[in-house]
Amino acid sequence: MLASVEKGDVSILVEAPTGISAEELEETLRGVPESIEETTELFAETPSMSDNTTEIDESTDAEDVTDDDLGGGV
């Protein structure tokens, strides 16, 4: 393990094979901060499941299933 960072629920761990040069490691990690920012923005733009709920009626799909819906029976 070369480095690890933890902040709240987020952990980042960097591992590399023995003998990797600093230049190889730098090249490998190039673009990682930008990728994390892009991913964070995507998650921020995606509505959560609770935001996407249009109606709460306290029922479940299982309550609406009949014997005919289960299939495979005689």
Image (cartoon, rainbow, N blue to C red):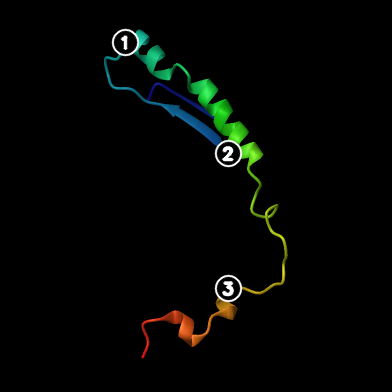
Amino acid type of disc 1? Ser
Question: CA gap, disc 3 to disc 2?
Answer: 32 Å
Tell me if 2 is positioned left or right of 62 in this view: left
Sequence-first disc among 3 and 1: 1
> Residue 33: x, y in percent?
53, 21
Between circles 3 and 1, the one closer to the viewer is 3
Query: Which residue is farthest top?
Result: 23
**Residue name at image x 58 percent, y 73 percent:** 61
Amino acid type of disc 3? Asp
Of residues 21 and 2, the one drawn nearer to the viewer in this rendering: 21
Query: For the C terminus, which image quadrant?
Result: bottom left
Mark linked to residue 9: 2
Amino acid type of disc 2? Asp
Query: For the N terminus, which image quadrant?
Result: top left
Mark linked to residue 21: 1
Question: CA gap, disc 3 to disc 1?
Answer: 56 Å
**Residue name at image x 40 percent, y 81 percent:** 71
**Residue name at image x 26 percent, y 14 percent:** 19
Of residues 56 and 2, the one drawn nearer to the viewer in this rendering: 56
Tell me the element at label 1: loop
> Residue 67: x, y in percent?
48, 86
> Residue 40: x, y in percent?
59, 33
Examine the image and state in which quarter residue 8 appears: top right
Examine the image and state in which quarter residue 55 appears: bottom right
